[in-house]
Image (tube, grey):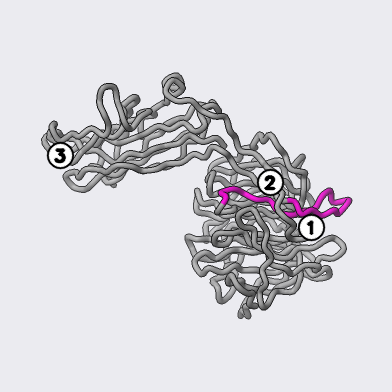
Amino acid sequence: MPRVCALSLSTLAAVTSFAFAQSDWTKLTPLPGPSARFWSHAVAERARVLLFAGGTRTNYTINNDTWEWRLGAWRQLSPAASPPGRSGHQLAYDSVRGKTVLFGGYDGTNPLGDTWEFDGTTWTQIQTTTSPSARSGHTMVFDPIRKLTYLFGGRDVSSNRNDTWSFDGKDWKFVTTTVVPPGRGYHTMAWDDITGRSMIFGGYAATALADAWAFDGTNWASMPGGPPGRYGSAMTWDDARKRVVLHGGWGAPSADTWDWDGVQWMMRNVVTTPIQLGYATTAYDPLSKQVVRLMGEGPSSQGVVYDDVWAFKTNALASDQVFGTSCKGSASTPLASGGNLAWIGETATFDCSQAPKNSAVVLGLGFSNTVWGALNLPFDLKPFGASGCTLSVALDVTGVAATNGAGEASAAVPIPNDKTLAGAKFYVQFLVPDAAANTFGLTTTNGVEATIGIL
């Protein structure tokens, strides 16, 4: 296990000045785009967000239009063919094949069971041999590890479903699992890039549900609970903040915002809260690096629909960036890389690989990569017998970690829970004892520049 290296808040504050920032919602005011609607669906596709259809309580099929949200503006697309109008459908972007998959929905009278694909230009109906039953209020997500689109649950003519299906671009396949979540509709689903699993939350089955489940392509597993029960909420992967974001819905006490970090749920204490909506849709906007919430329905007793666009992001992103070079060891060249990002109040991790097996490495952490006392950095270690090796960071804090049988080690750095540290930088490098590498008996990895962010 690595020795924990604790940042000194007093040292950090003494060398840098910082600006306060935090994750928050902002209402955007683009030029007119799609008409107000609910139970639409949007998905991040290439360098844009794609939105299709949606309707109102009095006309579920009023829309079959396709829209692009890009660079803060709407643009209506004009595909040569389009699916019939609907609400309560689902989209999933297959990033391997470069196509958006659509399944099902509601036509105002009956659930739908058709499959369509959008290739960026037009929609094409896919005739499959097997298929999930017609349904609405289901969920879908693309799994980039298994290269399949997964569908779970939803409501058919008479009941809530709890079946799991996969789509490979040609046909649907029923997935048999040992563990099956209870049937539900109007739940939400997102890809969790931290754990490499698809996850669902909540939904409705006689009451608002508050359970979370994760699917690894083989089986479902129950996850720790957190947010209050809800249905008609919106959830998506936030690639900038490396979190799953859950927002709003009915049954929830308010338009609350929650994060899932791969281990636990945390409610975000935002300054600005959007109006509480149900059946809105969220997607990660890859160009602006923020989550956008689109459309939705107001209090269900009113059935009022909205065309609102809200954005959720932090103005202080945590990040890692490698710099410098490593020097060759006796067997291989050790490398340093970032792990968990440096978010305020959480623990950042840094990894060393290709080091000697079952040995010790030293984590050097500094607040500069240009000077350390009287030394200018990077400092060449050739005069000491370590040709090609350099000290790249100030050694303000050091700690020891042990490598495993694969020559890998990880070091943890707790980040103080002080919002004024947002935007601060620190630097890490591993010093790797290796008696056979050179006469100095030491090699060095590249450096990693870490920027502290605030969630």
Q: For the residue labelled by badge 1, is the local secondary structure a helix, a strand or a loop? A: loop
Where, by quadrant of the figure, is residue 180 drawn?
Answer: bottom right
Report the mark closest to the observer, 3 or 2.
Answer: 3
Q: Position of residue 334 (x, y in %)?
A: 26, 44
- The residue indicated by pointer 2 is 247
Report the mark closest to the observer, 1 or 2.
Answer: 1
Mark 2 or mark 1, which is nearer the start of the sequence?
1
**Which amino acid is tagged 1?**
Ala
Report if the CB atoms under discs 3 and 2 are less than 8 Å apart. Answer: no
**Which amino acid is tagged 3?**
Ser
Where, by quadrant of the figure, is residue 99 drawn?
Answer: bottom right
Q: Residue at x 69, y 74 (%)?
A: 82
Q: Is residue 327 visible?
A: yes
How many residues crowd mark 3 within 10 Å: few (<14), some (14–19), many (20+)? some
Residue 298 in magenta stretch: yes
Q: In which quadrant is the N terminus drawn?
A: top left
Q: For the residue labelled by badge 2, is the local secondary structure a helix, a strand or a loop? A: strand
User: Which residues are the magenta region?
Assistant: 288-308
CA gap between label 3 and label 1 equals 66 Å
